[in-house]
Amino acid sequence: MEKTFGPGMGLGGWETAHSGEVPEEFEPDDYFVKHKAAHVPPTFYNELLKLERSTWLPFVRQWAWEWQHLREKLGTGFTLYPHYFDEYGELHAGVMGQYQQRQSEVFRSAHIRTFALAVATWNMPLTVAGDYLLDHIPAIGGFFDLDPGESPQCLFNLPTKCLAEGSDLQAVLADWVRANRSSESPCVSIASPFPMELEKYGEVYVGAYFVSPGFEMSEDHGLYEPMDFTLVKDTLSIHGVVQNTEAGQMKRKGKAGWSVPVCSSFLPIPHGFWTSDYFALGFPIVAPYCLPAHSAIRVREGFLELVAENETVARTRIWNDVWRPTYARGGNTRCGAAAELEKHLFDELTNRAPEGSKLAWFIRTRIWKRPTEYGEYAMEERRALALDEAINQPA
């Protein structure tokens, strides 16, 4: 509380914020047993189980005990998955919904109260308990100020072109790269859903990469931006965070050769479960080895900006496109994200390539379709890769 709202705002109360130790004769309710990994992330149960096995203390049963006390006190109903919000046929075809129900809050509160008991009665250090409870933070500083806005200029009509009948993905990529160069702030990573009226479940991604001579993509997957895990538990804010990732840390092997992304996928720990949509999609930020100087993060006017020597050198924006809580299994909700580089730095990008590598562009489309009205959704994927210098060459 104090890290988020300021000194003196912590309420305390760890000594009494629990229901006492679980009685030996207590048996967890069947509903709790069946839904302990449904209303909240499965990691809550898994971590308590590990603690139980290492300490011989009944962490899981204590969680069930706290849940039962809260549920009875609040009169919370035994809610199941809210299928009434979804289309029946789509639900059975693998489409999932992102919903926050009242039982989610009860399970979360009971989980927190379990650690309050552990601190007050089982001598767990408060700092240890706090680390286990970071996943309950809804949002962290900086992300409160990120606003979904309009899609960037550099998206152009890329999603529509990808869906054109008989489209050549390599040609679509080349056209987009040429148009992107003329943008005021060219994109080096962009992910967007397809227009709702064309494909309900699907997305296109384009990213810039440095690749070694003779590079070939792996057959099982294309290129991707590795997660850049950044600990912010001491500040609970992304303001002022300085990235120090090196190109060697981001190097990934292909079928032949290697690649290094121009962007990493930023994942602060904790990041807050309210913003999980965008982190599931991937939150791209320009990697420090692509910038002329060390940069720090700030959030201003709804954008995440990278600032070096008092100048904005890159920014990341997010947007929603006919957003809805449902998504196909393995996919994301209808949100987009793009990382943009200042024009003069974009023009210098090839000069920052790791030794022996060249700038390339990767495109991937993923569409979830079903052969019949009642069939299962299956993903169709296309990929293409092109060297920047090849796109530059006149036809």
Image: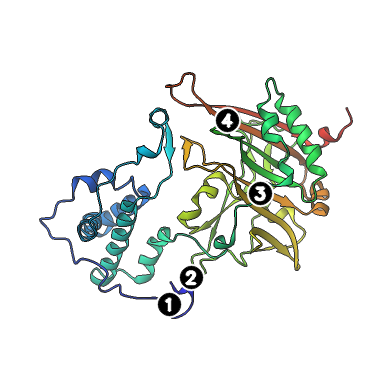
Reading the image, the residue beneath label 4 is 199
Sequence-wise first label, 2 or 3:
2
- State the separation of the CA atoms marked 2 and 3: 29 Å
Is 41 left, or right, of 319 in this rendering? left
Tag 1: amino acid: Met
Sequence-wise first label, 2 or 1:
2
Reading the image, the residue beneath label 1 is 9
Is 34 left, or right, of 382 in this rendering? left
- State the separation of the CA atoms marked 1 and 4: 47 Å
Query: From the viewer's perspective, is the residue at label 1 or at label 3 nearer?
Result: 3
**Residue 357 vertical placement versus 62 (above, below):** above
**Residue 201 vertical placement versus 349 (above, below):** above
Sequence-wise first label, 1 or 4:
1
Do labels 2 and 4 touch, CB within 8 Å?
no
- State the separation of the CA atoms marked 1 and 3: 36 Å
Tag 4: amino acid: Glu
- State the separation of the CA atoms marked 2 and 4: 40 Å
